[in-house]
Image (cartoon, rainbow, N blue to C red):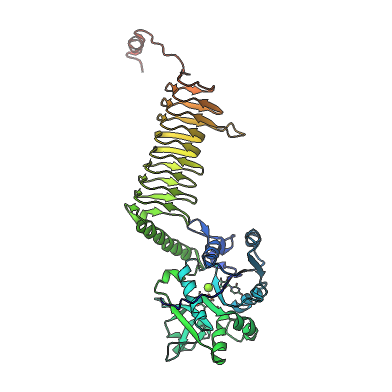
Amino acid sequence: MSAAMTDIAVAAVILAAGKGVRMKSARPKVLHEIGGRTMIAQVIETARALAPQRMALVIGDHSPELTAFAGALDASIAIAVQAPPKGTAHAVEQALPALDGFSGAVLVVYADTPLVREETLRALASEIAGGATAAVLGFTPDDPGGYGRLKLDANGELVAIVEAKDADPDELAIDLCNSGVMAIEADFLTRRLKDIDNKNAKGEFYLTDIIALARAGGKRCVVIETDDEEEVIGVNSRSDLAEAEAAFQWRKRFAAMEDGATLADPSTVYFSFDTAVGKDVVIGQHVVFGPGVSIADGVEIKPFCHVEGASVAKGAVIGPFARLRPGAEIGADARVGNFVEVKKAVIGADAKANHLSYIGDAEIGAGANIGAGTITCNYDGHAKHKTVIGANAFIGSNSALVAPVTIAAGAYVGSGSVITRDVDAGDLAVARGRQTAIKGWAARFRKTRKGKS
Ligand code: UD1
Ligand code: MG
């Protein structure tokens, strides 16, 4: 993909007024997620990376959820409502007030095409900087199906976009298709959009007609073709959503490996949009990262872990079969082993919780040892309470720490204790039934049972 590197002011118009009925969902289509982030947020962030001078989002009026989403966006994004939707040109028309006085390249992107790349948008804008009136992102799908076809002249310049429903057999035979993503010179767009009519098979105002209008006025239109078909996946159904998710996951896997992480079996590691993975991180098979995770250099995540809203510092070893929930902060070189769940808890450097524990609403000091089966009893049915464990404390196996409670630095808790009161530094707390032995009881018991069922 080559492009003139001239700088140009950019505006972004994001279209999201369609109904997305094929998702068969109560939730509006563009609020479905890819990599833990809604498609619409993904597209907004991609556009934002170009530092656009103006941004506009076009939505319908049929979804209170989408209206609420738009309402919560920051003021740099103008919200335009298109109701009822009458086509993509009509949608862009609703955004024109937000473009008032703007000159430069207007990028039109679809909120249901979540994987379009920042570099591609830049390349399209650069074509406008280079003198083109419109630049369209094209691709050659295996099955051109219902996509608009891109008609080129002998010089390879774009002459028109013909929607599949309006195409003649020759046009249908064209395999270069419209992704829907395009850049249009702002002045031309604002002056001529109103000249687009709806005399076509669908009776809609097609933005794609802007190309023929430009050509009729002697203007130059171009196609940038992407060879990454995944970039232009348009999500219309749940299977499209799954396909886009898979493509997104491979992007993240390659990025993590590129940045110096080892993935034992990349196809089984799942990332979120914001997962940050350091260098020399080793990630085993079947690991899932929810949103909000950062993994520092040299960490090992063994197989079958679920990690979400958590940070793991340098050199720590997690898993196998560990669950880090939101607010888990694992210190450098700490160990969190199998069947350990950590929620909203700081685990100090070099501390260990290796087996079968729940650590929630807690602070564990450096070098502390949390024995197998230790549970922080953080919830009393009404509120959450905190457990504080000092540096180098030792919690014996199968202890219940009833919060709020503090175990001071260096203290010991005997195995099987239920701790309800604070333990002072250097003390041993034992809170369990004292062991008694009844001499010979077992032997006597067996004798009395002999011969009876
Ligand atoms: C559109 C293109 C087609 C291209 C295809 C790629 C037009 C006329 N056709 O067709 O050339 O191959 O995308 O996927 O542009 N939208 C609105 N308001 C409307 C209509 C649509 O906001 O009135 C939004 C939709 O929410 C969606 C996008 O525009 O995000 C595309 O609309 P859609 O109806 O899916 O267009 P296609 O028929 O797929
Ligand atoms: Mg579509």
Residue ranking furthest to the front: 6
- Location of residue 317 (image quadrant): top left
Which quadrant of the figure contains the C terminus? top left
- The answer to whether residue 254 is left or right of residue 25 is left
Which quadrant of the figure contains the N terminus? bottom left
Q: Position of residue 416 (x, y in %)?
A: 44, 23
Q: Position of residue 142 (x, y in %)?
A: 39, 76
Q: Position of residue 276 (x, y in %)?
A: 44, 52
Q: Residue at x 52, y 80 (%)?
A: 128
Seen from the viewer's position, the closer of residues 352 and 333 is: 333
Up/down of 192 relative to 367, above or below: below
Seen from the viewer's position, the closer of residues 389 and 146 is: 389
Seen from the viewer's position, the closer of residues 209 and 256 is: 256
Q: Position of residue 352 (x, y in %)?
A: 39, 33
Up/down of 401 relative to 27, above or below: above
- Location of residue 271 (image quadrant): bottom left
- The answer to whether residue 75 is left or right of residue 281 is right
Q: Is residue 179 visible?
A: no
